[in-house]
Every structure is written in structure tokens, then in C-alpha cells.
Amino acid sequence: MIKARKSGSPLRSLPYLSWLRTDRFYRVLIFIGSISVISWLFPIGDQFEYRYDLNEITQDAIIAPFNFPVLKNAETLESEREAARLSVPYLFRRDPQITTAQLNGIVDLFTRVRRIRRAENQLTQNRQRAYRYRYDERYEEIQQAVERDSTEVLDLRSNFALRFPLDLNAPHWNSFFIGETPEGRIINYSRLQRELERIIRDILAEGVLDLPKSQLGEAPIALASEGVEEEIDLQFLVDLDEAWAKAKTRLQAQYPVEAATEISVASDLLIYFIRPNLIYDDETTQRRQEAAVGKVPISKGFVLKNERIVDGNTRVTPEILEKLNSLAAAKSQAIASAGGFQLWLPKIGMVAITIILLLFFYTWLYIYRNSWFQQNRVLLLTNLLIVFILAIASLFHHRFELSEYLIPFTVVAMMFTILFDARTSIIATVSLALMMGFLVGNKVDFALVNLLAGSVAIYAVRQLRRRRQIFTAIIYIVLAYAVGITTVEFLKWTNLTTLGIHLMYASINGLLSPIMVYGLIGILEVIFGMTTNLTLLELSDFNHPLLRRLSREANGTFSHSIIVGNLAEAAANTIGANSLLCRVGAYYHDIGKLARPEYFIENQFRMENPHDTIAPHLSAKVVISHVREGLRLAREYGLPQAVVDFIPMHHGTARVEYFYQKALSEDGGPDRVREDTFRYGGPKPNTRETGILMLCEAIEAATKSISKPTLPRIRQMVNTIIEMRMIDGQLDDCPLTLEEINRIRGDAATGTGIIGVLKGIYHVRLPYPTTEKKPAEEEVTEIKELPKAAVFEGTPTE
């Protein structure tokens, strides 16, 4: 019997392929990718062993391990190379063909002008004859000659305009073509041609540069002509503007002022025909300059093996710093030349440092913020922030060679605080500060300054309640940089000028960093689906369309939500949870009641309760449906997921106790009532904030049922609700500890927690004096205390 072959690739059955599709694989991939990118950003090849700054104190004596040259510092070397480059003369080559071509052009121009003049004269004569013989039989023949002459003049002028693109519409050119000035003086073409040829020949013989003198500066000039090259002083040469000015001066010396037509025509022709004949040889000049720069030595001395470079506990002078930098460069070159395993040692070290510092952050995240660690998008975001700031640091410090104090380190510190929390930000700041110290050249002082500035930035935005706090952080950051930089630079005996430059760069950094944070936060919120305090602040505004609608259509629910928000915020503050998220979540947790507000008792003012006329299971269905309707409205109004979670989780899988007990009494016992139809669909609270809201919401509803509320009765009701929520398992998925629940419960003496707020809500008032007895219908009847079984949504309020 032949068995049928199973479809699909056999590779799918391999166990490691299924692991590749798990979240753990993507977390490992993110970790490896971050290590690779960060390690690549580190300056591989730099020798941290000899990294000192000017005026820094050495720790130990440094002895030369081998012979090496002392390299010039970058400024000195660049200055000498620039001097060598400027010492090479700019090479210009004389082009004799330009002189010949321009003089031939003058001859051609005057030849054409004479033809035009003869044609103009012939045309004038024929027109006069046509007028004289206008009644004669020869008129037709003469008129045809006029037309031929007119066509010839037009053709000659058109060809002239094409050959010589001059402004021929000017009045002096019309007189020039006719050969007579407006004053009636005959223009001498031959003399004008001779003067122009002489002036052009003389100017081009002196030489006209094809570069303006302003571009050449004081650089030496070399002139190559007929195979002979010689240096010449720039003052003996002219550029094009100077050549035109000199030619016009010589022209005016040959003609009186009255010869305005000749001077105007000749000026136009000089500008047209005088062209540069000394052509700059850019290729040869640059080749010679590069050769001269290449001959500049990069070293200025030599250190022998075993020679003492510097003693321990000695201040680093500029001479010592040059030797140390030279030793670091020589050692890096020696390792690179040797190859083999030694070449990989620095790279292995950088990878190891990156792994250690990232694991420090990851370990804290795994232990104390495991819910975030399990989310790949959060893990990707944290790594992108780390790589982002390190990439900027590498770009600023190694590519553009800018001051390290321009690196916007505090941007990431503030973004971690706003996106996550202050504790996570502190750990990330410590890891990043150490990475940054290694990145800029093993500078512990720079790491300490960043750690101080980052910590102060975290403090400035740790409890973000107003957008202006981001910009107030500018003052904190600038002051932190000022204190940190001044302290470390004083230890290094840095002069005041250098200190001032560092402080200036740090101030620019402190000014721009909060602005960058303000712009980036909105982008990251959208991309990664994060909800920051800035978004929560916008949602807490009572002018939000959903809250305005709640206050109009379900005013009782709106008031209930505000009181629950106050309770949740106070409770969150006692354990360090996100109090703003608790308050905003409370504002929106019951928005589903907008669908049927009249079915909830807080919205029933002097009206019949509709639950009195329907079956208990239908009442429970209506009450439970407010969760589904709330989720629908949340999607419709675009509420963030962090706020949406409060809608189903504030009830969890609790039972609608009042209607369940009513069903039991009406239907004859638990065997005839399905309990699951009276329970919410969940899920149960899975964060501290949603757990807090569940307790506060139930406590607020239950305390309203206490007749003559006193502090012992309130305390007993709070304890009862918390106990029964825990017994029912509603807090099983919530990370709240017993100690935190106890602090959430609060204390009336200190005014903290839930009891502290309820004490203020139900404080005793003195009765107002009155002489009139209240009408019977306005007397407030006491609400008897509910039994324990009614604690779970025990009244028709839910």
C-alpha cells in the first residue's frame, strides 16, 4: 500500500524554524543589531591607552616602547601645507592665436562696414534719381534698382549683426554705418581702424588674465610663452576689467571730446575684441601644488625606544600631548601592519564594552520592567534611541570634529523619561554616558558631565504636567552643564578662554535639546503607538469632544468619573505609579454609558428606574454592554490604547452582583441562573494603573450607599471591597503587591491614598440655620448599608 506524501516542505518541521518566528528571536535580533551598529560607531584603531587632554594629569609614567616620529599637530601641519600650496605660482599660458584672431576680426569688421557704407550711398543715390525721374519712363527701372539696393543693405546689416553681436540700435552705430556724424563731420574709417588695431595689439601684448586679480590674491604668477616659463609680478599684468579701462583711456587720448561718435563706437569694439590671452592652466597648477604639499614632512622630531615621554602625576603640556598622540598613532599603525589576531583585539574590546553596557540596561529592564521587555516595539524603540544619540556623537566628534559638548545627550534622557519613566531613564542615562565616554576617546570627565546633565534633565521632566516644562528644562540643562564643565575643567587647569568655548557649545546644546525632544516625541508616539504624558494632558482637558458630550448627556457619570479620577490619582501617587494615566483613564472608563445613560442610577434624577420593568438578565446585559459601547467610542474618537485598556479592565470579569442576586430570588436558585451571563467579559487588570482604577471605581460606587458615612464605616467599606476583589481573583494578573495595596488603601491621619480623599469628600458640614421646615419630598432619606454580597456592583448604579 502506497502512502500519500504530505504536502509542504519538510523544513517546516524543523524545531529551530518555529523558534525563528517567536518574539524571543526578534528580541535577540534587535540586541545583535544594536551591538553591531554601536560597535561600528566606536573609533576602532584609536589607542585609549595614551589618551590624555591638554593640562590633564597623567596617572603613570609613560616610556616609549619603540622608536617613533613625533607628528605635528593638525593645526601646524595644515598651516605648513597651506603655505606650501601658496608657494606654487599660478601658471598662465599665452595664446598667440587670440591676438591674431582679434586683429583679423577688426579687419573683417571694417571691411563689412565699408560695404554697408557703399551700399547705403548707392541706395541714397538711386532714391534721389527715382525722385528726380518720378514722371519719366525710366522710373520703373530706377525703382527696381532702389529695391535691390535696399535689400542688399538689409542683408549686409543682418550679416553684420550675426557676425558681431553688438548693440546696433544705438544712435552712434547708425551714424557710423552712414559714415557721417550728426554734426555733419565725415568719419575716417581708416584712422579709426588703425587706432583700434594698435590699442588691441598693445594690450594683448602686455597680456590679459582670464581670472580676476581678486581671485588670485597675492599668489605668485608664472607665465609660459613659446616654451619659456618665467615668474612675473602680478602688477605687470591686467585682468579683463583693467584691460578695458586701459584701452578706453588710450582711445580718449587719440580723439577729442567732440568725436563722440568715434569714441562710442570704438569703446564698444574694444570691449568686444579685447579677450584674455593668458589662459590659466588649472591642471598643471594643481598637480604642482599637490606635489609641494606632499613634500611637507608630517613629523618634526623623533623619540627613541625607552625614552621617558612623561612622568606620572605630571601635567600634560602641548609638547607632551604631541608625543602621546604620536605614540598612539604609531602603535595603531604597528598593530595594523602586523595583522593577525592583534588587529582584532580593539574590535573585540569595543564589542565587549557594548555588550556589557547594553546588558546592564537590558537586565534592569527585564527584572523591573518586564512588561516592556516583552514588547518588541518597545525594545526596538529603546535601542533606536540609544543608537540615534551615539550616531550623532560619532558624526559630530569624528566626522565633523565638532566639540563633544554639542552632542545632544540630554535629548535621549528626556525622551526616555517622557516615553517611559524616570527610573528607566536613569539606567539608560548611565549606560549611555559610559558609552559616550568611550566613543569620544575614553573621557571619563565627559561621561560624568553627561551623567550630571542627563540626571538634571530627567528631574526637569519627571512629572510632566505642562508642555512648558519641556522648555523650562533648558535652564536646568544649561546650569547642569555649566557646573559640570567648570568643575572638570578646573581640575585640568584649563584656561578661561577654552572654558568659555566649552560653556558656549554646552549652552547651544541645552537650548536646542528640548526643542528637538518636543518635535521627536510626537513622531515616535505615532510610529510606535506610545502614549506620553503630553498626550494624556491633551486628553485630560474637559474641552475634549468626548468629555464635553459626557458632561451634557450623562452628567452623573461625568461627575462619577471625576471623583474616581481624584481617587485613582491619589492612590497612584502613593506607590509611584503613573498618576496622570490613572486620572485620564478614569475620565474615559465609563464613556460607554453614553449609549443608554438613563439605565445607570447616577443619571436618574427624579425619574423612574427602567430596570424595574425588565428582567434581571436583560438589566445585566444592558449594564455589561457599556464596556462594548465604550470600546466602540474609543476607536471612533481615536483614544490611545493605554487609555482604552481602562474601559474593559475596570470591571475585569466581575459579576453584576445586584442583578445576579435579584435573578436568584426571582428564578428560584443558582441551578436555574447562568452565572456567566452576569459577568463582564474582561480582561482582568494587567497593570498597576488599571488595577488601581478597578479598586477606586468600585469603592466610589459603594461608599455612596453608606448611610451617615463616618470614617470607620468608610474604612470598613474600603477594606471589604479590596478584600473581595482579591478573593474573586480580579487582581491575579495585576503586578500590585500587598504592600502597594496597603498604601493604596491610604490613611486618614496622613491624608494619603483612597481613604484620605474619601475623608475630604464625606467631611461633616454644620447645618445652615433656617426657620422653615423642609417639605417632605425634599427630605433626604438614608440609604441603608448593603450586605457584603452586594459589594460587587451591588446597586443599580452599574
Image (cartoon, helix red, strand yellow):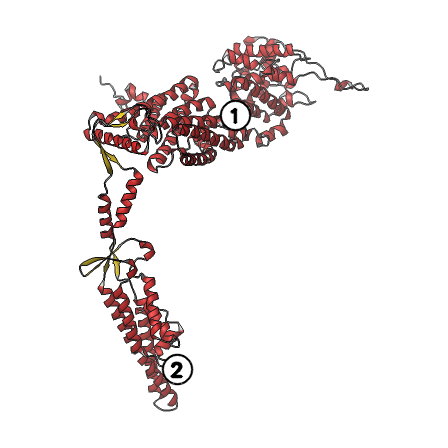
Q: Residues within 10 Å of mark 2 (few under 14, many from 20)?
A: few
| Residue 396 seen in this snapshot | yes
Q: Which residue is mark 2?
A: 184
For image coordinates 64% across by 16% down, the residue present is 759
Vertically, is 144 above or below 544? below
Residue at the right extreme, as displayed: 771
Q: Position of residue 384 (x, y in %)?
A: 38, 29
Q: Position of residue 10 (x, y in %)?
A: 26, 22
Instruction: Assign a secondary structure to mark 1.
Output: loop
Q: Position of residue 604 (x, y in %)?
A: 66, 22
Q: Position of residue 180 (x, y in %)?
A: 36, 80
- Relative side of 628 to 16, left or right: right
Q: Nearer the viewer, residue 82 or 563?
A: 82
Q: Which residue is mark 1?
A: 463
Quarter occupied by the N terminus? top left
Instruction: Assign a secondary structure to mark 2.
Output: loop
